[in-house]
């Protein structure tokens, strides 16, 4: 029994599939299967059994998994203790975030990370919140920044901020006065341009509409806030975006932003990690650094990195800030 065999066994057990584990480990599936088979031969018992949904652990496999995780954690702790004797933090860390948050992290976090951990390796990848949570459970990444609630068991969240949702309308065809607010009931009557499920905004709107006994009229399903804004400007329908998404772009005077009330709908931004995976020292320090970067106040004149809750730029965004201060009457 060696370290690689245990590592491969744990990866297969957690992924529930040799194919997924091979992708996570970046190894060929035959080589992975061969290592696990050698482990079974050495231990003289089967560790997995096949079922209609893939593979499952045998009783012996469950016992080994509990011990193997402890062994791998001890090895990682030993590496950390040795790294701590050197100057500076070492190691690799992978972080994932949705497109807009990734842009913000690239502008702020990367500089701070390279300054604090010059000998460490950093990878930042882009993905939807649902995919990021899956990557965390598979061990492909260490930390994620996600919108909305946890969509999978085993994900732990640290809430950063909540952002209100706004109806985005073409100004010339806006169905409400500029000083108004809109209820969820009223949204049901509008032709909406929304992302497809399981996007957190789409799921939140559908759940709230269903709770009120209604439904949404979705005429277009598109991915990306930029594309939604463009289609709204062209008159294809109405979009719904969070104040965070709106704060990260220059908005045209042709758009009108209307807050959604009765009830007020918000979209949370969170740091996510897998609760069953021990975070390395580098990951823990990086997590704290991400919090600092995303919650730091905006830099004057910096329109490229709009920190939370959003250094709004453009006159439409300024109107949004003014409306938030004044309040609005619901329709």
Image (cartoon, grey):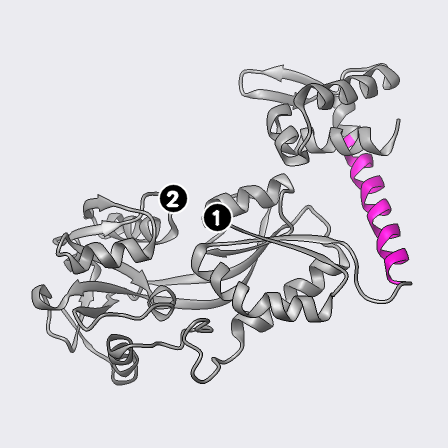
Judged left or right of residue 83, residue 161 is left
Q: CA distance from mark 1 to mark 2?
A: 13 Å
- Where residue 87 is drawn, which disc sits there? none
Q: Quadrant of the C terminus?
A: bottom left
Compared with residue 156, is residue 37 higher up or lower down, i.e. above or below?
above
- The structure residue drawn at horizontal position 20% and vertical position 54%, both measured from the top left corner, is 231
* Residue marked by disc 2: 198
Callout count: 2
What kind of secondary structure does the magenta stretch mostly adopt? helix
Residue 5, percent from left and from top: 81, 28
* Residue marked by disc 1: 127
Q: Quadrant of the N terminus?
A: top right
Residue 76: say if magenta: yes
Within 10 Å of disc 1 (Cα), the crowding (few <14, some 14-19, many 20+) is some
Residue 312, percent from left and from top: 35, 76
SS label for mark 2: loop
Asked if residue 23 shows in the view, the reply is yes
Within 10 Å of disc 2 (Cα), the crowding (few <14, some 14-19, many 20+) is some
Compared with residue 148, is residue 166 higher up or lower down, i.e. above or below?
below
Magenta-colored span: 65-84
Residue 36: say if magenta: no
Asked if residue 148 shows in the view, the reply is no
SS label for mark 1: loop
Judged left or right of residue 116, residue 265 is left
């Amino acid at each position: 029994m060696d370290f690689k065999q245990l590592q491969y066994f744990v990866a297969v057990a957690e992924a529930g599939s040799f194919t997924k584990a091979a992708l996570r480990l970046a190894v060929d599936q035959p080589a992975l299967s061969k290592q696990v088979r050698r482990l079974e031969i050495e231990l003289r018992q089967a560790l997995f059994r096949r079922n209609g949904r893939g593979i499952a652990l045998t009783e012996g496999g469950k016992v080994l998994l509990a011990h193997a995780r402890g062994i791998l954690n001890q090895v990682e702790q030993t590496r950390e203790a040795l790294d701590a004797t050197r100057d500076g933090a070492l190691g690799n860390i992978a972080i994932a975030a949705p497109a807009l948050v990734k842009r913000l992290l690239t502008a702020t976090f990367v500089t701070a990370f390279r300054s604090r951990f010059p000998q460490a390796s950093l990878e930042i990848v882009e993905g939807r919140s649902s995919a990021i949570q899956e990557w965390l459970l598979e061990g492909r990444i260490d930390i994620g920044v996600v919108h909305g609630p946890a969509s999978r068991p085993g994900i732990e969240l640290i809430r950063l901020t909540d952002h209100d949702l706004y109806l985005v309308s073409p100004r010339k065809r806006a169905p409400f006065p500029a000083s108004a607010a809109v209820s969820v009931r009223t949204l049901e009557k509008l032709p909406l341009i929304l992302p497809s499920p399981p996007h957190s905004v789409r799921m939140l709107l559908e759940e709230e509409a269903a709770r009120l006994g209604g439904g949404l009229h979705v005429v277009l399903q598109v991915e990306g806030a930029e594309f939604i804004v463009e289609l709204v400007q062209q008159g294809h329908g109405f979009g719904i975006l969070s104040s965070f998404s709106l704060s990260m772009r220059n908005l045209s005077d042709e758009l009108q932003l209307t807050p959604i009330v009765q009830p007020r709908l918000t979209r949370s931004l969170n740091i996510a990690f897998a609760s069953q995976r021990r975070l390395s020292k580098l990951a823990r320090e990086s997590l704290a650094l991400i919090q600092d970067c995303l919650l730091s106040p905006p830099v004057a004149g910096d329109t490229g990195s709009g920190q939370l809750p959003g250094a709004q730029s453009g006159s439409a965004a300024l109107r949004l800030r003014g409306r938030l201060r004044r309040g609005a009457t619901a329709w």
